[in-house]
């Protein structure tokens, strides 16, 4: 004779169905020694009864006019009691599995989360798992378990709205990690993890509103990774993710030296430089920074004399440039042909700060600084020598014997060699700048006067005063490869900074020949003042100044049109001309006035006259 259900709470009240034969006319139902609270004869073979209170296992019997039935076991079960939930919050969408701990759970048939229920998986009398159903809305609900023993006490479970993420700041960082980040969004409270790719970040805080989350990025590999935030309300991904940037490396800086006044354009080479955010020289930031994957360019700040540590900072980290950068005091050198002196002018104060005397030779003419600014070469026409000057001490450290009556001198752009034009020898002396030794002699035209290297250093132009020509020298082979016919008595020569053209000052023709540097052909001729001597291009290449010895003027040429746009009156017998490194000033030596005129290049006006030695010939700036 079966009974269903065969268990119920100790408080009674369970409706059971008893099925059997010969039970028509039932007069009583007993649960152990206690009568059922009530019973109903449903049919001759079925009776329903309501259990009384009780404990343990009792026998259920039916009494009819024919007697009393055999007992059927009925189990009284204690009501369940809940102690804890493994997780007390989760997404409104549900779907997460939690563990419920307590007692009397072995007969659990349902778990209620507020008004929604789910069927549990019973693990033991003290533990069950259940998949949380979806909630109606965010907020707390009561969790209750129903078993054969009744319904348990309640524990709180909070439905949490799903998180959202809108931005991460910064969006990039080094592969070494350690970058502090901020994520903005909603419902970020209680974030249990933030991952960059598969790597967990360190979460340091979430604001009370749950709209910002801060943390520290873990290490990662170069490239973009997904940033995922997990909260009790679910998981979200930051749009665009986060990009790991490889650490930068640096190999060279060009140039390696420059004046303490700053303003020198530099280029740093290396790898992973595209995200460069700054370059510092001994901690002082450079300006006008631009970068590619392999280069960073900018303008040096002012510095102090000596070697500065140069560091490049990118989104991937910081790298130090090998060898650093050397700042040297800026100076202007003026050769004084009539007094066998070199005047040293401070370009900041425009004062003569030193005079280099012996062993500078007699009749010093041409002067040039090495690209790194550490030395200067002065050609001495009367002694057929070149004086080597240490620019840090303004002392002559060596004397080099060259050809007869040397006039002009120039260093190659890489600073490895210098060319000296020997007027009476009709040659060019090639000097190894590292050893200060003549390594070759090149035969050129008659009366070589001045020499200029192309900006890329592949060729040099030498003006030949007596043959109205320019010799073109291949600097790799030190051989003349071409000869260009120009005006009468060509003296000064210079290349534009971009290397596309060269100008030649024709002393006897009162003109400037314009040469296409690619074809070595004269493309036009510009009329200037009387007896043009020397010329120089401005650093930005937009203009050229031509010293007109016979008229005491400087012709200003617009290099885009090759036309004279202005004429500046200077001293008597101007010979040499040089621009300041930043191009804001120009210096002109006045051979017969024993002065140097300082020109404001923005207004093309003389703003200062500096007395120097006798018969100032050439001027150079570093």
Image (cartoon, grey):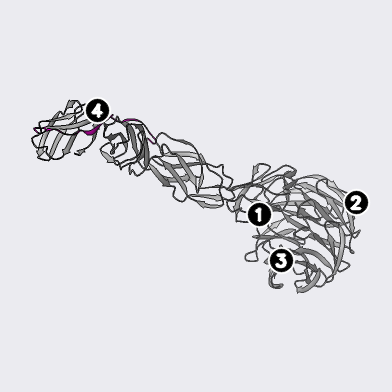
Magenta span contains residue 407: no
Viewer-proximal residue, 304 or 232? 232
In the picture of the structure, the residue carrying the numbered disc 4 is 10
Whether the residues at callouts 3 and 2 have beta carbons within 8 Å, the answer is no
Q: Which mark is residue 503?
A: 3
Q: Position of residue 614 (x, y in %)?
A: 84, 52
Judged left or right of residue 170, residue 108 is: left
Residue 339 visible, this orientation? no
Residue 341 visible, this orientation? yes
Examine the rendered structure and indicate whether residue 266 appears above or below residue 460. Answer: above
Which element is circle 4 on? Answer: loop
Spatial CA distance of label 1 from label 4 is 83 Å
The quadrant in which the N terminus is found is top left
Q: Which mark is residue 547?
A: none
Judged left or right of residue 27, residue 197 is: right
Spatial CA distance of label 4 from label 2 is 121 Å
* Label 4 vs label 2, nearer the camera: 4
Specify the segment rendered in magenta: 64-87
Which element is circle 1 on? Answer: strand
In the picture of the structure, the residue carrying the numbered disc 1 is 270
* Label 3 vs label 1, nearer the camera: 1
Whether the residues at callouts 1 and 2 have beta carbons within 8 Å, the answer is no
* Label 4 vs label 3, nearer the camera: 4
In the picture of the structure, the residue carrying the numbered disc 2 is 359
Q: Residues within 10 Å of mark 1 (few under 14, many from 20)?
A: some
Please report whichever mark, 3 or 1, sits nearer to the chain's N-terminal start: 1
Q: Residues within 10 Å of mark 4 (few under 14, many from 20)?
A: many
Viewer-proximal residue, 244 or 292? 244
């Amino acid at each position: 004779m079966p009974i269903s259900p065969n268990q119920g709470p100790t408080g009674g009240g369970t409706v059971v169905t008893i099925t059997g034969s010969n039970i028509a006319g039932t007069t009583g139902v007993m649960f152990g020694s206690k009568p059922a609270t009530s019973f109903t004869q449903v049919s001759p073979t079925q009776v329903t009864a309501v259990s009384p209170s009780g404990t343990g296992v009792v026998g259920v019997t039916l009494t009819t006019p024919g007697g009393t039935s055999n007992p059927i076991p009925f189990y009284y079960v204690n009501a369940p009691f809940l102690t804890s939930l493994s997780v007390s919050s989760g997404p409104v969408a549900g779907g997460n599995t939690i563990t419920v701990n307590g007692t009397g759970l072995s007969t659990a048939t349902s778990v209620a989360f507020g008004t929604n229920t789910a069927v549990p998986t019973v693990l033991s009398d003290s533990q069950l798992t259940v998949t949380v159903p979806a909630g109606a809305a965010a907020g707390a609900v009561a969790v209750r378990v129903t078993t054969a023993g009744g319904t348990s006490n309640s524990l709180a479970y909070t439905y949490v709205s799903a998180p959202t993420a809108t931005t991460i700041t910064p969006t990039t960082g080094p592969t070494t990690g350690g970058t502090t980040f901020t994520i903005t969004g909603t419902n970020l409270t209680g974030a249990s993890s933030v991952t960059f790719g598969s790597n967990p970040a360190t979460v340091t805080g979430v604001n009370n509103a749950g709209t910002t989350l801060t943390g520290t990025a873990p290490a990662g590999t170069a490239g973009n990774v997904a940033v995922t935030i997990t909260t009790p309300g679910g998981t979200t991904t930051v749009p665009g993710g986060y990009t790991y940037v490889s650490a930068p490396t640096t190999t060279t800086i060009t140039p390696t030296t420059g004046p303490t006044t700053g303003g020198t354009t530099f280029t740093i080479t290396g790898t992973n430089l595209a995200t460069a955010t700054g370059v510092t020289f001994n901690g002082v930031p450079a300006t006008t920074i631009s970068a590619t994957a392999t280069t960073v360019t900018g303008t040096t700040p002012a510095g102090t004399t000596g070697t500065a540590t140069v560091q490049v900072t990118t989104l991937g980290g910081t790298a130090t440039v090998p060898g650093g950068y050397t700042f040297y005091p800026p100076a202007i050198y003026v050769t004084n042909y009539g007094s066998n002196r070199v005047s040293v002018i401070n370009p900041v104060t425009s004062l003569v700060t030193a005079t280099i005397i012996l062993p500078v030779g007699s009749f010093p003419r041409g002067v040039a600084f090495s690209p790194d600014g550490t030395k200067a070469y002065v050609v001495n026409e009367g002694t057929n020598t070149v004086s080597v000057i240490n620019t840090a001490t303004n002392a002559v450290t060596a004397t080099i014997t060259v050809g007869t009556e040397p006039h002009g001198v120039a260093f190659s752009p890489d600073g490895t060699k210098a060319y000296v034009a020997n007027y009476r020898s009709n040659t060019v002396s090639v000097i190894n700048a590292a050893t200060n030794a003549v390594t070759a002699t090149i035969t050129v035209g008659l009366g070589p006067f001045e020499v200029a290297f192309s900006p890329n250093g592949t060729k040099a132009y030498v003006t030949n005063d007596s043959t109205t020509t320019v010799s073109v020298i291949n600097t790799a082979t030190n051989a003349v490869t071409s000869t260009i016919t120009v005006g009468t008595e060509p003296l000064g020569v210079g290349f534009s900074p971009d290397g596309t053209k060269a100008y030649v000052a024709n002393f006897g023709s009162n003109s400037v020949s314009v040469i296409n540097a690619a074809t070595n052909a004269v493309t036009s001729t510009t009329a200037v003042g009387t007896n043009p001597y020397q010329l120089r291009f401005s650093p930005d290449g937009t203009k050229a100044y031509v010293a007109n010895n016979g008229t005491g003027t400087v012709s200003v040429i617009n290099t885009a049109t090759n036309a004279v746009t202005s004429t500046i009156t200077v001293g008597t017998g101007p010979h040499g001309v040089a621009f300041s490194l930043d191009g804001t000033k120009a210096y002109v030596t006045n051979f017969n006035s024993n002065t140097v005129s300082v020109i404001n290049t923005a207004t093309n006006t003389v703003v200062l006259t500096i007395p120097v030695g006798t018969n100032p010939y050439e001027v150079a700036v570093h």
